[in-house]
Amino acid sequence: MKYTDEQRIEKMTITTEKLLNYLDTNHISQEDILSQETIRWTITTPLYNIGEHAYALSDEYKMVYNAHGFSFCFL
């Protein structure tokens, strides 16, 4: 299925909110992430999914938001 840029942004936002909620609910700190491989493995998939959606945004979308100060490191 081909997603629109807006759908990709929505999926990225929802995934980010879920991940942050998980970290907050479980009181997971930066130190926990750095020291516990299990936690790193747990958060890798959501981060990968966010990155995949960001990478797949259209060039036009990236250019518009890059012009407004939001940088995409994969341009």
Image (tube, rainbow, N blue to C red):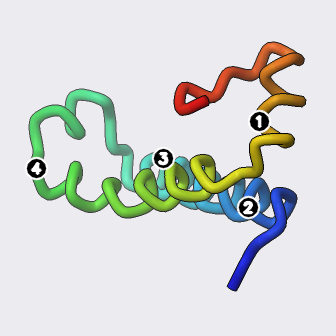
- Judging by the rendered image, the residue that carries numbered circle 1 is 62
Circle 3 residues within 10 Å: few <14, some 14–19, many ≥20: few
**What amino acid type is highlighted by mark number 2?**
Arg
Query: Which numbered mark, 1 or 3, is in the foreground of this view?
Result: 1
**What amino acid type is highlighted by mark number 3?**
Asp
Q: List x then y, in percent, for residue 28.
A: 33, 43
- Judging by the rendered image, the residue that carries numbered circle 4 is 37
Q: List x then y, in percent, for residue 33.
A: 23, 39
* Residue nearest the observer in this picture, 48 or 28: 48
- Judging by the rendered image, the residue that carries numbered circle 3 is 24
- Residue 5 numbered mark, or none: none
Circle 2 residues within 10 Å: few <14, some 14–19, many ≥20: some
Q: List x then y, in percent, for residue 14.
A: 69, 61
Query: At 21% from the left edge and 38% from the top edge, which residue is drawn?
Result: 32
- 44 relative position to 70: left or right: left
Q: List x then y, in percent, for residue 1.
A: 69, 85
Query: At 78% from the left edge and 22% from the top edge, which residue is drawn?
Result: 66
Q: Are marks 2 and 4 in contact (CB under 8 Å)?
A: no
- Say what secondary structure mark 3 lies in: helix
Sequence-wise, the earlier of marks 1 and 2 is 2
Q: CA distance from mark 3 to mark 4?
A: 18 Å
- Say what secondary structure mark 4 lies in: helix
Sequence-wise, the earlier of marks 1 and 4 is 4
Sequence-wise, the earlier of marks 3 and 2 is 2
Q: Are marks 3 and 4 in contact (CB under 8 Å)?
A: no
Q: CA distance from mark 1 to mark 4?
A: 33 Å
- Judging by the rendered image, the residue that carries numbered circle 2 is 8
Query: At 71% from the left edge and 51% from the top edge, which residue is drawn?
Result: 57
Sequence-wise, the earlier of marks 3 and 4 is 3
**What amino acid type is highlighted by mark number 4?**
Glu
- Say what secondary structure mark 1 lies in: helix
